[in-house]
Amino acid sequence: MSALLPAALAAVASLCGGGACALAGLCLARKGMRARRRNRALGRQGLLVRRLERPEMQSRILRYGEGLTRQLLIGSAVPCSPSVRAKRAERTRCGAWYAERRAHSGLAKTISIAAFCELRMRMALAGAAAGLLVGLMVSPELGTALGCAGGVAGCAMAYGAVRRSIARRAAVAERHLSEMLEVVALGLRSGLTFDRSFALYGTHFDNGFAQSCTRAYRSWALGLCSRDEALRDLAASYDVAALGRAVESILRSLRFGSALAGVLDEAARQARANCKAVLEERVAKAPVKMMLPTGALILPAMLLLIIGPVLLELAGGF
């Protein structure tokens, strides 16, 4: 009996441990199922923030640029180029390019022109150094070539991060513009004022465009600027022509006292038509984009599979 007691205790302990693990796994699985069920329900109601509207880790490049802005502002960072100074950076080609696009990218208050020029310079130097180190392992000639290519790639990554931010914000605005106009029109038909109807959209919807609308409403509600200026700044912060036209129609109706609900319905219809046209254009471009991987990867393999046996027979005959 004394010899069987340790084995029995070990068996009971293992059974208890296995049961505890199974129970914990079952609880986690049920929790995950409830979370997926809730997300599906929110998605059907249009309340779930889509992946496109998320910051996508906000791009490490842009976060680094935000840090450079703070460091250059307090003087804790030494610029790689003397042209990064604020007044001189605006006259450079890089500074002029970023100044034209910083409003649409949503980075006007986070990354300064001088910080973007410094970011581009540092990215180019980092890319050149990485390419040089990798190439020198093989030969000096390859190191020189890879260093030049890395510098160009690093510089292009800074520009690409801004372009991606502009495209992402524009896609979110195009997707939710008709939704915002319909909510404001519904509030007006319910007897609310335009200000209260506009604030209603930002209160009950959670996406990047709704947050921008909320900031615009608070800016004129707190007296920081007029309503016309806040709405025009909102339109200028997105590279969406339909948003600019809708804002001008709203301001014109508010100025002359015409019926605003009908104007908003027509603007929402046009916004939906524009969004549908953009999606159809993307779908039409998909087969053309698939031709490159098809021709570069699949076609050579098919030719090798078909012509390979013939070539082997010919080689064996000779």
Image: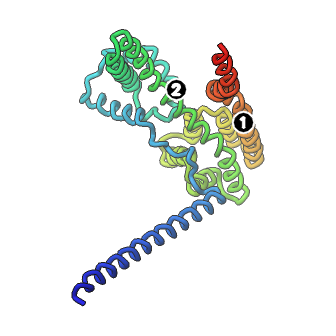
Which residue appears at 70% of the width and 26% of the height? 306
Residue at 48% from the left image edge and 24% from the top image edge: 159
| Residue 257 place in picture, x, y as percent | 72, 44
Q: CA distance from mark 1 to mark 2?
A: 27 Å
**Few, some or many residues within 10 Å of mark 2 (<14, 14–19, 20+):** some
Asked whether residue 292 is in view, the answer is no
Q: Is residue 315 left or right of residue 112?
A: right
Please name the residue that numbered disc 2 is placed on: 101
Query: Which one is in front, 178 or 46?
Result: 46
In the rendered structure, which disc, 1 or 2, sits on the residue that comes first in sequence? Answer: 2
Badge nearest the viewer, 1 or 2: 1
What number is the disc on residue 114? none
Q: Residue 22 vs residue 232: left or right?
A: left
Q: Secondary structure at mark 2?
A: helix
Residue 201 placed where, x, y %? 61, 53
Crowd tier of the residue under label 1, counting other residues whose Cα lies within 10 Å: few below 14, some 14–19, many 20 or above: few
Q: Which residue is mark 1?
A: 283
Give the vertical position of 282 relative to 133 (above or below).
Answer: below
Closest to the observer: 150 or 191?
Answer: 150
Residue 269 position in % (x across, y down): 76, 43
Q: Residue shown at 64%/50% (left/top)?
A: 194
Residue 68 found in image quarter: top left
Q: Can see residue 92?
A: yes
- Identity, as a three-letter code, of the amino acid under mark 1: Val
Q: Vertically, is 77 above or below 143?
A: below
Q: Dot 1: what SS? A: helix
Label 1 with label 2: CB-CB less than 8 Å: no
Residue at coordinates 35% horizontally, 75% vertically from top-left? Answer: 17
Q: Position of residue 66 (x, y in %)?
A: 37, 34
